Image (cartoon, rainbow, N blue to C red):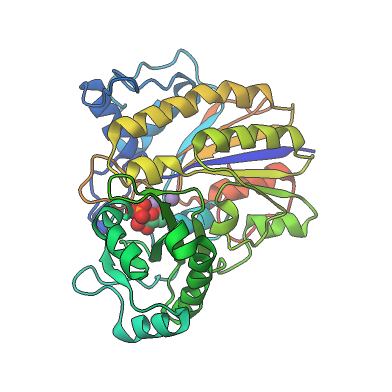
Amino acid sequence: MARAFLFVLDSFGVGGARDGADYGDLGSDTLGHIAEFCAAGAADRAGLRQGPLNLPNMSSLGLLEIAKLAGGDYPLGMPLPERIFGLHGAAEEISRGKDTPSGHWEIAGTPVMFDWGYFPSEGPAFPPDLVEAICREGDVAGILGNCHASGTEILTRLGDEHIRSGKPICYTSSDSVFQVAAHEQHFGLERLLDFCQVVRRLLDPLNIGRVIARPFVGETPATFERTGNRRDFSVPPPEPTLLDRLVEAGRNVHAVGKVADIFAHQGISRVVKATGNTQLMEATLATMGEAADGDLVFTNLVDFDMLYGHRRDVAGYAAALEAFDRSLPDVHRRLQPSDLVVLTADHGCDPTWRGTDHTRERVPIMAFGPGIRSRSVGLRPTYADIGETIAAHLGIAAGTHGWSFL
Ligand SMILES: O=P(O)(O)O[C@H]1O[C@H](CO)[C@@H](O)[C@H]1O
Ligand SMILES: [Mn+2]
Ligand SMILES: [Mn+2]
């Protein structure tokens, strides 16, 4: 029997979305713009990285052809490989949101065809009766923030006041999220997680996708730092996903990193905890050694998005891509004859774009394994084709969205 390994490089878009203009994102291109900045010497950082974007392994998996297919141009400064190994293509998102759950669920065969609830970007973000209920039931004297914000900037601005007043910092973004930043010691980590569960319950009628706990440490604005104890409280996917179908068929789904939270722990056999791309890759490589025939190992690499995309840090994003690329030979070395590896993304987060939010983009599909023949699978009309391909590879019944490209 076969095994499958799915890596979501969180926010690694390749531009070209047909509906980009509907999101104010026409022209956004995470890979293309990073490559452009690198080629121009605008993403050099002493001690971190220099020069053109260097992704030889992903280039050999067809990344440059994917960029051309999705956005019309080869990325600047990246040499074309002599040969391409594996299947390569790009996919369009049909879910309406450009958020992490929508992207992951669609990859797993379950597009989100309804609109999430969102909070307004002008004036107070949260309705007064909601704030009143949150304070009463969450047992806090009030909330700080109550606005759209970048999670690191709002800590610098309100972290001190939070410590003094004990009021949690509550903010949102263009995603369907309610985020709560609170100090791990002064407010308490357990208390923050309990508070988020209360908020989760109160938000269900508003159709908000996620409540995110954002614990931090440090005693001054210069030293405040978010920790790896982030937790996402997601609503469950609207229909059974590939993960549920696999578990139903008696397979194991190994969820590495925040995958379990993204799926509200539905269709997960085993949670492998790790924080940061380096640890996440180490944990995935270890899990590759343990996965049985018929299993899926599903890893989300969150740093691309959280540490670099949202922070609009081009050099940081480029360096993280280069580090991931260098780890691909370790993945190759662990492959068994019937294994399939898929690399893809859940949305874009172009670090050269205005604001700090995600960008609507197409995503890359790179699929390889010892038994996988090299060819282009073209532009796929939905991310669900990825889930269907994995379903076909693992030999379970087809779902109701998407088509396998195997
Ligand atoms: O700015 P931070 O707190 O990283 O938040 C970002 O992370 C959220 C979840 O991915 C997004 O909705 C965006 O707001
Ligand atoms: Mn994401
Ligand atoms: Mn994000």
Q: Is residue 68 above or below residue 40?
A: below
Tell me where residue 311 appears, x and y as whole percent: 30, 44
Which of the two residues, 320 or 243, is positioned nearer the viewer here? 320
Tell me where residue 341 appears, x and y as whole percent: 61, 34
Q: Is residue 321 visible?
A: yes
Q: Is residue 12 visible?
A: no
Name the residue located 55 percent from the left edge and 60 percent from the top edge. 110
State how many labels appear. Answer: 0
Ligand 1: image quarter: bottom left
Name the residue located 38 percent from the left edge and 42 percent from the top edge. 307
Which of the two residues, 214 or 256, is positioned nearer the viewer here? 214
Tell me where residue 159 appears, x and y as whole percent: 31, 58
Name the residue located 32 percent from the left edge and 39 percent from the top edge. 30
User: In the shown orientation, is residue 306 left or right of residue 398?
Assistant: left
Q: In this view, does 13 lie above or below 24?
A: above
Which of the two residues, 312 or 388, is positioned nearer the viewer here? 312
Which of the two residues, 131 or 78, is positioned nearer the viewer here? 131
The C terminus lies in quadrant = top right
The N terminus lies in quadrant = top right
Tell me where residue 202 appears, x and y as whole percent: 46, 80
Residue 6's image quarter? top right
